[in-house]
Image (tube, rainbow, N blue to C red):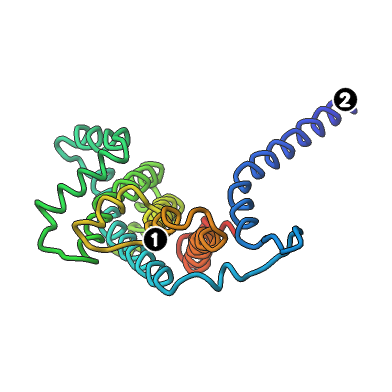
Amino acid sequence: MMKRLSQARLVDSVSYLYLIFISALILLPLSITLYRAVVVETDSGGLTISLNSYMMISEAFWEKVGVSLSIAIITVVIDVAISIPAAYAMVRYRLRGKRAILTYLNGVWYVPGISYGLSLVLAYFFVFKFLLGFWGFVAAYSTGFMLLTLMTSIVAFRSLDPVYEEAARCLGAGRWTTFARVTLPLVGPGITAGVLLVLVLSLNEFITALLLTGPTRISTAPLHVFADIRHAGIRPFVAAEATVLQLVSLLSVVIYLKLFGSRYLRGTVLI
């Protein structure tokens, strides 16, 4: 008995150490960026903590942050509104060519980012050309990231046992009531996974934004940081801009989970 307890404690200790190691690897880039932003060298050669780098951030950067947030939020709303009905139909109904459609959609995952970004640019010129500026960017992002919400929603609907929907209908609930009050809350974790992926990626996407900034004449916050790196190098204020982007992404996730995690999409509360 004591031997089993010792083995269990050893396994727990190794597991905790492994989690700490992985967490340290993940947090290391953020920590170094934050260090570069707030720790400066004094005239005497020492080091001190200063927030002057954040004061040096230009107003143009904050405007780009607002643009990136607006694009990300609208992209999430559009993708969710289209993906949830499409995923439900593909799982619950028999459609001709469904397997071929899913195979084609899965194939998009294996396309390099630069190739897919170029495809979006070409699609913009031929399809979205009537959308100028901001809305052209939204249209391109929505089509580019829709696969994330669609696939996660399909997986969520497939894992849902239809018996819950059947029970609700037997108790007198209509089709729309069953879908809104039974189906959606049960597939909430899958939908949330797609929402968070699209939200974070659309906030921080660089390659696609770099290719789209020409035809749309819109610049995002990641592009602004890249331009500052090219012109000024990795200066403290550039590191401060990078930490701001990281904090904006984190706060966006926190706010989303606080608003929808426990109230509607049950089972998704991480904080």
Task: Tell me if I can see residue 91 in this picture.
Answer: yes
Choose top left, top right, bottom left or bottom right for residue 72.
bottom left
Question: For numbered disc 2, what is the local secondary structure?
Answer: helix
Q: Which mark is residue 3?
A: 2
Residue farthest to the right, as pictured = 2
The quadrant of the image that shows the N terminus is: top right
Residue linked to disc 1: 224
- Please indicate whether residue 7 sits to the left or right of residue 241 in the image: right
Q: Nearer the viewer, residue 222 or 120?
A: 222
- 223 versus 25 height, above or below: below
Q: Compute the Cα span from label 2 to label 1.
A: 59 Å
Q: Residue at x 24, y 60 (%)?
A: 137
Secondary structure beneath label 1: helix
Q: Residues within 10 Å of mark 2 (few under 14, many from 20)?
A: few
Q: Residues within 10 Å of mark 1 (few under 14, many from 20)?
A: some
Task: Say whether residue 257 is visible.
Answer: no
Q: Closer to us: mark 2 or mark 1?
A: 1
Horizontal arrangement in the rendering, residue 232 relative to residue 143 (left or right) = right
Three-letter code, disc 1: His
Total count of labels: 2
Amino acid type indicated by mark 2: Lys
The residue lying furthest to the top in this view is 3
User: Residue 46 location in percent, x, y?
Assistant: 76, 59
- In the rendered image, the vertical position of residue 15 relative to residue 269, given as above or below: above
* Residue at horizontal 39 percent and vertical 71 percent from the top: 60
